[in-house]
Image (tube, helix red, strand yellow):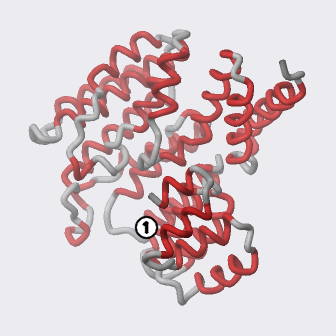
């Protein structure tokens, strides 16, 4: 209920709801940012250095970044958590997600490096590789090659036994998925499709088979879109139906966020704006990687609404994109400048 109130920009209602149980550190930080209470924000950031509960500090970064959609305001909290000695891997992954949501791959990669170094398992390494393959980040070819070399040399079986989780057996499968997307991004479709086949054939048990088929389908769809075959991408994604075991549903990449973006891209390329709109507008609400994709989803929604003549909706989505990516990496600036130009045109047009 509180999340819904915040998402509707009804901060007073959200505060009244949480008052029944009492505000914790994360709630206080979120409301202070929402109300522009700089004095309280400064005090809470001082506490963040050592006295704040680390779990609540991470929650503060998450609530400010995702619920308020203000990743730049969440970043100081995420950085404070990453500087603490406890839960360093988790905190640096939170920081990396925050930076990626701002279009800042270079800074995020540094956070991933710390997360990898301070973790006993392979999930941070996989998270780095999967994020690097996101086409809208335009990660340079040389960096993608280095990430692929690192991932190819890594053997999940060598991870610390003490770090094993209930999903540790899926590490080799996610590694294949990442290698497939890396091959696609590097312009090697044959290698990518070969990896997709290996992923489909990899033993994992009946419970996980649909989820692994969905990952392989995403690789095939990625290759198809890169080859300008959007109809083939839609066909490949037909097997992606949300058949995800409950304990994996909130975990990337099994949450299928990237497959939904690919479907939206393919539908747009086919000129099917209405169906693309449904997928993009409804497919990323409170998903595990909502904020990673939020700016790009808004950019595409703005484009759709502009074509439909829904001027105010287009303005709102372009403005959201510009706000989220205002500090993006230099190579990504052209997209922001184009959105600014569209905003200027739309806001300058006479109303009818």
Give the total of numbered labels.
1
Of residue 179 and residue 9, the one placed in the foreground of this image is 9
Q: Tell me the residue at 81%/31% (across/down).
A: 343
Of residue 349 and residue 22, the one placed in the foreground of this image is 22
Quarter in which the C terminus is drawn: top right
**x then y, percent, for residue 200:** 21, 29
Q: Residue furthest left?
A: 206
**x then y, percent, for residue 37:** 73, 73
Q: Tell me the residue at 50%/30% (across/down).
A: 280
Quadrant for residue 140, please give it: top right
**x then y, percent, for residue 302:** 67, 28
Quadrant for residue 89, please give it: bottom left
What element does badge 1 sit on?
helix
Q: Is residue 108 above or below residue 232?
A: below
Q: Is residue 82 visible?
A: no
Q: Is residue 187 above or below residue 108?
A: above
Of residue 269 and residue 172, the one placed in the foreground of this image is 269
Q: Is residue 265 above or below residue 62?
A: above
Q: Tell me the residue at 39%/12% (across/down).
A: 232
Q: Is residue 332 visible?
A: yes
Residue with the mark numbered 1:
90
Q: Residues within 10 Å of mark 1 (few under 14, many from 20)?
A: many
Tell me: 156 left or right of 322. Answer: left
Q: Residue furthest bottom?
A: 51
**x then y, percent, for residue 271:** 55, 10
Tell me: 348 left or right of 123. Answer: right
Q: Tell me the residue at 66%/72% (across/down).
A: 32
Q: Is residue 300 above or below residue 36?
A: above
């Amino acid at each position: 209920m509180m999340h819904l109130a915040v998402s509707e920009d009804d901060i007073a209602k959200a505060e009244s709801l949480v008052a029944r149980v009492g505000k914790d550190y994360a709630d206080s930080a979120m409301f202070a940012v929402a109300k522009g209470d700089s004095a309280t924000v400064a005090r809470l950031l001082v506490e963040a250095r050592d006295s704040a509960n680390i779990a609540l500090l991470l929650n503060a970064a998450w609530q400010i970044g995702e619920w308020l959609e203000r990743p730049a305001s969440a970043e100081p909290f995420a950085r404070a958590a990453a500087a603490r000695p406890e839960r360093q891997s988790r905190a640096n992954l939170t920081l990396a997600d925050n930076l990626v949501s701002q279009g800042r791959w270079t800074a995020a990669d540094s956070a991933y490096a710390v997360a990898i170094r301070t973790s006993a398992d392979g999930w941070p390494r996989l998270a780095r590789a999967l994020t690097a393959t996101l086409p809208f980040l335009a990660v340079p070819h040389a960096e993608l090659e280095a990430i692929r070399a690192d991932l190819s040399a890594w053997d999940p079986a060598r991870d610390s036994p003490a770090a094993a989780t209930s999903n540790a057996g899926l590490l080799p499968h996610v590694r294949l998925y990442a290698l497939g997307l890396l091959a696609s991004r590097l312009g090697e479709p044959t290698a990518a499709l070969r990896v997709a086949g290996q992923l489909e054939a990899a033993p994992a048990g009946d419970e996980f088979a649909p989820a692994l088929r969905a990952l392989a389908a995403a690789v095939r769809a990625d290759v198809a879109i890169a080859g300008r075959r959007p109809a083939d991408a839609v066909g490949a994604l037909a097997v992606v139906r949300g058949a995800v075991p409950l304990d994996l549903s909130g975990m990337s990449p099994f949450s299928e966020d990237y497959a939904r973006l690919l479907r939206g891209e393919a539908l747009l390329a086919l000129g099917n704006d209405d169906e693309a709109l449904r997928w993009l507008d409804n497919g990323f609400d409170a998903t595990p990687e909502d904020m990673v994709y939020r700016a790009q989803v808004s950019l595409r929604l703005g484009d759709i609404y502009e074509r439909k003549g829904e001027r105010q909706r287009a303005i709102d989505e372009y403005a959201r994109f510009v706000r989220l990516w205002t500090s993006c990496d230099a190579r990504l600036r052209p997209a922001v400048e184009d959105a600014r130009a569209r905003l200027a045109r739309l806001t300058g047009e006479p109303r009818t």
